[in-house]
Amino acid sequence: MLTYTPPSLHLHLHLHRYPHSTTISSSLHHHPNHPTTTAPDPVLRIHNSKTTSFLHHRQLATTTTNETKNPPQEYENDHHHHRDSEDKPKTPPHILPPQEKQNILEMSLVTKRGPQFPGSIYANSLPSLQSVIQTQNEDDEDDEEVMIRRALDIRRKVTAEVFKAAMKKGKFGITYSTNLVNRLPDFIDHVMIEAAALKRSPEFKDSTFNLRAKLVIDHSNVVPLIRWLKHNNLSYPKIAKLICMSKGNLDSIRRLVEWLKTVYVKGEFLGATLLKSGDDILHRSLEELDEIVDYLESNGVRRDWIGFVISRCPRLLSYSMEEVKTRVDFYLNMGMNENDFGTMVFDYPGVLGYFTLEEMNQKVNYLKEFGLSTEDVGKLLAFRPQLMGCSIEERWKPLVKYLYYLGISRDGMRRMLTIKPMIFCFNFEATIAPKVQFFRDIGVREDAIGNMLVKFPPLLTYSLHKKIRPVVIYLMTKAGVTEKDIGKVIALGPELLGCNIAKTLEVNVKYFLSLGIRVRQLGEMIGDFPKLLRYKVDLLYPKYQYLRRTMVRPLQDVIEFPRFFSYSLEERIIPRHKIMVENRVNFKLRYMLACTDEEFNQRVADKVERRRRFESGRMDDAVSDSQMAEGTLGKTASSSLSS
């Protein structure tokens, strides 16, 4: 079957087949003034004609180069040819574009042969890589380094493809394999170097690079290791980083993971523990690690706590035995016993490994400036080791300056530190300052805020929006506390802000209202004695029953003196009431209870002497009616008590 070829293509093909043809050469430089040349016979299109044309084009470029050095006489006389060359400068034919050179390299190093079809250009039909690089080096020596770098990049891509093929054989998905291989540049280079080294062996002298790379990957057992690490809950970024850390010694990863399991490190923390233990952890012996664990266990850290401690402080495994002993002795020398040390390390494992010894000494010395001894600091750190994680410049000094601005002395700060050391772990701008501003807004006086914080330091640990504000709203809406008195209530009884609304405040409010006390009166009682709502109803009920049934006192007495519920029934109320009955005297609740035993006995003696003088007739006429009324009430109470 014949195929029609256009004239332009015919000339192009004929030029490649007969590069020295004078007829076709002159036809390419045809000018209107020249005589017309008869066209040659058409050439039939054959199989792979484009490939053949491309190869002849390469041969023509080489031939043209040689002819340029010794040009024929006919080209010297051809003025039109020189005019065209000067008007349109051209790149020398033997200089390849960068993209074409890249394609040649990639095609020469591909892992699989590309699809073949009529007209395809194969790598074996192109000029060899060596000849191309040699030709380019004659023009530009710097281009050699660029080509070598490109060749290395292509080798890396080939190695990565071989690795992906091994992953695919290991039943890994394409996406997982691609994501993992992209994070393994060091291991890919290791495989590439090992595969290149195999070339020196006579056994693999004539083998392909792909085969040698595959042998290196299979021999390293990296694919089964990846499967095993994935089974142990390690994500592919952690697996990739571990493989790169191993520097080719993949057995060290499995060995260390098995050891971590023996000390109770959970699977979900294995990857993080390995990655944060230091770059040299994979090269440490298990005997050194066992020695560290045994030493910690001998100083109070229980065996089943070791896994938790190591997973929270992996850096501990990177220290030498001498370093670990120095850090442990730092805390034991402050008076800690083994139990305190063990619980401290379990509560905050970072206390052993996250800070330098210099930083630890600076923080201990700063805490001593509040008036604490070394033993006091040791007890403080055993109770709240998180203090060691706070910065002096960024956390403690700004807080101390702020507390001093509120009028809190050094002794007050020491009380806050010993009662609630967590306060010194807070960022005062985000946690403490908004609460202080809220107290100002509800009417707490400026000079009372500091005293309130020193009196009840846990107040600063409560949530402003979930704890403090809801309690204030409940007191003003349900307990009858007015807006005028709410600031005084909070200043006198900051402990109220720590009470549970449903279990404490609401139960007490309902009980007092059930006694017949109005909401407004209850608010006044709370303003006079804020602690009233903190007592349990089981303690309030017996006192109220004794007041009403035994002492025969009206409800108004409780409204006027709500502190009555703060005194002990067995140790204060009943004994003093018996003394009053025996001496036939009576006092208001305030004078009866709000005094010491000596003052109470003196008041009773004065009352008895006054009554005796009255009964003997020597009493002045200026005896007040109120005193006589009190005597009458005392007789009534005594008769009720005897009955």
Image (spheres, rainbow, N blue to C red):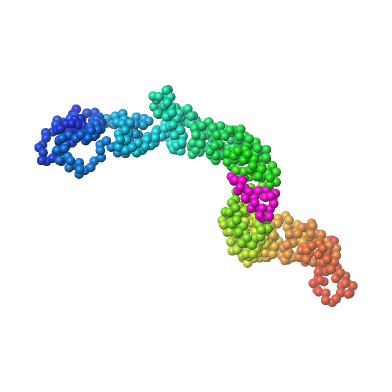
In this view, which residue lies farthest toward the front? Answer: 70
Q: Quadrant of residue 542 in the image?
A: bottom right
Residue 621: % across, % down: 84, 77
* Dominant secondary-structure state across the stretch colored magenta: helix
* Magenta segment: 354-381
The quadrant in which the C terminus is found is bottom right
Residue at horizontal 40 percent and vertical 28 percent from the top: 209
Tell me what residue is drawn at x 38 percent, y 37 percent: 149
The magenta stretch spans residue 316 = no
Quick check: can you spot residue 505? no
Residue 366 position (above or below residue 562): above
Residue 243 in percent (x, y) is at 49, 35
Most extreme residue toward the top is 203
Q: Quadrant of the N terminus?
A: top left
Q: Quadrant of residue 586?
A: bottom right
Q: Residue furthest right?
A: 616
Work out whether residue 365 or residue 354 is closer to the camera in this orientation and state it. Answer: 365
> In the rendering, at what x and y percent does residue 304 appear?
64, 37
Q: Residue at x 62, y 57 (%)?
A: 400
What residue is at 45 percent from the left and 37 percent from the top? 185
Say if residue 98 shows up in the picture.
yes
Position above or below: 74 against 609: above
Q: Is residue 173 left or right of residue 592?
A: left
